[in-house]
Structures are given as C-alpha cells and as structure tokens.
Amino acid sequence: MKLIDFVKESSFDEVWDEMKSLYSSVADRKEVYENIFNYLKTAPEVDCDLTMFLRFETDSDIRDYDFEVHCEIYGLKEGDDEDSYALDLLPWKEWAHMEVDCESFNLIADARVFIAHCLWGMSAYGDTEEIVQSTIDVIESRIKSIDGGTAEMLSWEEVKDNLRERFPDVGF
C-alpha cells in the first residue's frame, strides 16, 4: 500500500487526535496538518523509486525530544539496503505515492498513528510545499557557492562563538 491509500481510508479528526498525543507542540497547528492531510488525498500521481520504512527509538536511545518514542521515517531504493534516504525534503506528492514497507507498518499497525508520524515528518521544513521548496532552493544555492568556491567559510571557533551568542544558556 501507499501512503495515499492509508490517508483515503482515514479520517483527519482521528489522525489529529493521535498527533496531539504524540507531539505536544502541534496543538495550535491543526489547520496546517489538515491541509497536508487533504493534499495527500488528492496528490497527483507520480513515480517514486523509494519504499517508506519506519524505525522507532526510545528516549533512552535519543535525547532532546519532548516525547518518549521517536519515529524515524526514511526511504530505501529497491536492491540498495546500504543507503537510506531522508524524506523530509521530498515533494509531498512523492510521499503520497510511495510504497510503505509492510513489516515497518506492522510495527504500528494503526493507520492513524502512521499518518500522524508522516504528517510530522512532512512538515519538518515548512507548513507548505512552497516553504519546503524554498528550503531546498537555499540548500542548493549554498551547495553551488561551496562548490564554486564563493561561499564564506567559518572556522569551528567562529561557529561556536555564533552559537554561544544565539544560545547563551547552552554550553558550547
């Protein structure tokens, strides 16, 4: 099955209830997630060469999260189990039409929870596809300037000084 199939069989209100219980920071962003959910229902068909997998880590495995279990959603290409791909910056239509690994889904076995984790991941870099695309554009521009030798490079000491200035309560 693809993500779009799970979404078409689900109700946003039920997914929203799961999101609020999984991610405390979403409470005031219902409209954002409802818009993404509705987009997924009607996302234009597109080929995607990745299969979606899920992995869970407990808070003993990770730190700096405000929830007990972290769900990582990533992609693998068929025949390539070595390299996994972050999905956060993929176009949302690719999320919609990506096959979901059955064994991974069975770790949850609840489409509402699965969709909630996907919506969270899809919005990691912005509330709309346009914002996500602008992030991609910035990254690509920075890669070009680095490859072209025109980027302003900072020493590690300068980076730490900048971070100390921005986050004085965190030790660097």
Image (cartoon, grey):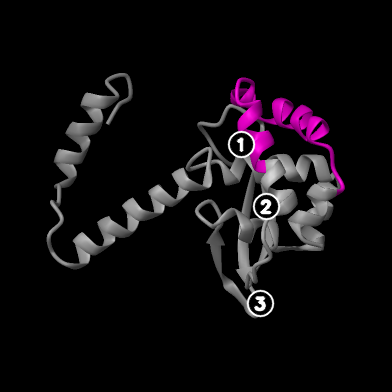
Q: Which residues are magenta?
A: 9-36
- Mark 1 lies on a secondary structure that is loop
- Mark 3 lies on a secondary structure that is loop
Relative to 80, residue 68 above or below: above
- Mark 2 lies on a secondary structure that is strand
Label 3 sits on residue: 78
Specify the quadrant that holds the N terminus: bottom right
- Which of discs 2 and 3 lies nearer the camera? The answer is 3
Which mark, residue 60? 1
Quarter of the image for residue 5 reads bottom right
Q: Amino acid at mark 1?
A: Ser
Neighbor class of circle 1 (other Cα within 10 Å; few <14, some 14-19, many 20+) is few
Neighbor class of circle 3 (other Cα within 10 Å; few <14, some 14-19, many 20+) is few
Which percent across, then down, holds residue 111? 83, 46
Residue at 78% x, 27% y: name it. Answer: 17
Looking at the image, which is closer to me, 54 or 120?
Answer: 120
Label 2 sits on residue: 55
Residue at 16% x, 67% y: name it. Answer: 148
Looking at the image, which is closer to me, 157 or 11?
Answer: 11
Instruction: Give the mark, 1 or 3, whose residue is nearer the N terminus.
Output: 1
SS majority, magenta: helix
Instruction: Give the mark, 2 or 3, whose residue is nearer the N terminus.
Output: 2
Which percent across, then down, holds residue 80? 60, 77
Which percent across, then down, holds residue 50? 63, 68
Q: Amino acid at mark 3?
A: Glu
Which percent across, then down, holds residue 54? 69, 54
The alpha-carbon separation of the residues under discs 2 and 1 comes to 15 Å
